[in-house]
Image (cartoon, rainbow, N blue to C red):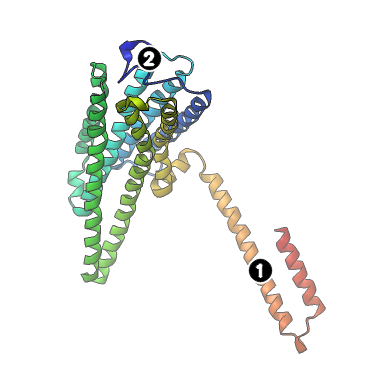
């Protein structure tokens, strides 16, 4: 390998197996599809529900993850056939940009959640389009400055410490503090509901329920992000900082955990589809699945209604047979019940 693109030490990146590369390729395809779907849904906004100011952070998160799927992951796959150090170097640069920008977006969403529950009436003035776009610009400048340090020649172990502290630990601490304040505020609002009039209490209760749902969604995004990233960060830290850990087993473990990192870039749209109705509706419309789903729902409703009707007739027939004179079933009742049971089995 050419030493001009060496990061941390020689052979920081090593060739891996074809199986691992196939996994990377599959995950890359999934990442691109999921985040392209998110971007297209936001652009088309079929129901006019997605283009809110706060959702610009979600769009930006999708773009950051798309960088991982379009550039960084495919370059890693290419290294199976061409292991030039420049390819590894470019892959690493864009992976840093994508990951750090993603975490900054999630942190920004947590701060917005705090303002939404702490000062709900002032949130619109604070979280306006201008401020959001400025903050997104700051995120990209911050994310890009890390790989620029590598390009300028800072490739020693100290760079990894700087990247971990500034790019990961500090944003995570900010996120955790913001969420502690969010849950404390929600708890206080819940207590105050007991002292309000019934009408006001119901309105505030509905608002709090909405905020809790949004807060849990952002928390879930961060938990999934960190759960998939932390194993890789620990192993990669050990490989860089501990020369005795630069063994084949550690490199294999890093390859495996790196696949989790790649997967984390595609999982967020699935979380939105599961947790947020507006995104779910938009995804279904963009994919052209609305009519098939509606037909499927109608079909199963008809089946359910038919089964319920047949079971009701069976129950009615059983009751009639039990109330015949002297408690003896008539032959016609037995025939009727038998026919209904046959119909149930056929359905």
Structural distance between the alpha carbons of marks 1 and 2: 70 Å
Q: Label 1, on which residue?
A: 311
In percent of width and height, residue 66 lies at: 38, 30
Question: Which badge, 1 or 2, is on the more N-terminal residue?
Answer: 2
Residue drawn where x is 34% and y is 23% of the image: 92
In percent of width and height, residue 300 lies at: 59, 55
Residue 323 lies, with reference to residue 6, above or below; the image says: below
Left or right of residue 267: residue 6: left
Q: Label 2, on which residue?
A: 85
In percent of width and height, residue 294 lies at: 54, 49
Query: Looking at this view, is 346 or 248 the one in front?
Result: 248
Looking at the rendering, which quadrant does residue 273 occupy? Answer: top left
As helix, strand or loop, the secondary structure at mark 2 comes to: helix
Q: Characterize the local packing of mark 2: few (<14), some (14-19) or many (20 or more) Cα atoms within 10 angstroms.
A: many
As helix, strand or loop, the secondary structure at mark 1 comes to: helix
Q: Characterize the local packing of mark 1: few (<14), some (14-19) or many (20 or more) Cα atoms within 10 angstroms.
A: some
In the rendered structure, are the residues bearing label 1 and label 2 in contact, judged by CB atoms less than 8 Å apart? no
């Amino acid at each position: 390998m050419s030493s001009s693109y060496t990061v941390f030490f020689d052979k920081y990146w090593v060739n891996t197996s074809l199986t691992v590369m196939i996994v990377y390729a599959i995950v890359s395809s999934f990442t691109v599809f999921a985040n392209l779907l998110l971007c297209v849904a936001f652009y088309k906004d079929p129901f006019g529900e997605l283009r809110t100011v706060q959702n610009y952070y979600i769009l930006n998160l999708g773009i950051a993850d798309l960088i991982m799927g379009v550039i960084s992951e495919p370059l890693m796959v290419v290294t199976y056939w061409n292991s030039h150090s420049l390819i590894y170097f470019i892959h690493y640069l864009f992976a840093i940009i994508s990951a750090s920008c993603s975490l900054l977006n999630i942190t920004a969403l947590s701060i917005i959640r705090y303002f939404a529950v702490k000062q709900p009436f002032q949130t619109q003035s604070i979280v306006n389009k201008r401020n959001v776009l400025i903050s997104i610009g700051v995120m990209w400048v911050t994310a890009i400055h890390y790989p620029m340090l590598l390009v300028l020649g800072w490739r020693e172990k100290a760079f990894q410490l700087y990247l971990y502290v500034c790019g990961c630990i500090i944003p995570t601490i900010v996120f955790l503090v913001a969420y502690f304040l969010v849950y404390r505020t929600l708890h206080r609002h819940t207590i105050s509901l007991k002292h309000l009039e019934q009408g006001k209490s119901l309105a505030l209760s509905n608002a709090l329920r909405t905020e809790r749902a949004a807060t849990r969604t952002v928390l879930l995004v961060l938990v999934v992000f960190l759960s998939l990233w932390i194993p890789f960060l620990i192993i990669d830290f050990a490989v860089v900082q501990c020369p005795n850990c630069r063994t084949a087993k550690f490199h294999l473990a890093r390859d495996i955990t790196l696949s989790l990192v790649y997967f984390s870039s595609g999982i967020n749209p699935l979380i939105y589809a599961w947790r947020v109705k507006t995104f779910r509706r938009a995804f279904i419309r963009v994919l052209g699945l609305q009519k098939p789903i509606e037909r499927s729902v109608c079909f199963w409703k008809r089946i359910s209604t038919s089964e319920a009707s047949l079971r009701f007739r069976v129950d009615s027939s059983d009751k009639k047979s039990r109330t015949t004179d002297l408690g003896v079933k008539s032959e016609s009742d037995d025939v009727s019940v038998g026919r209904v049971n046959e119909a149930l089995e056929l359905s």
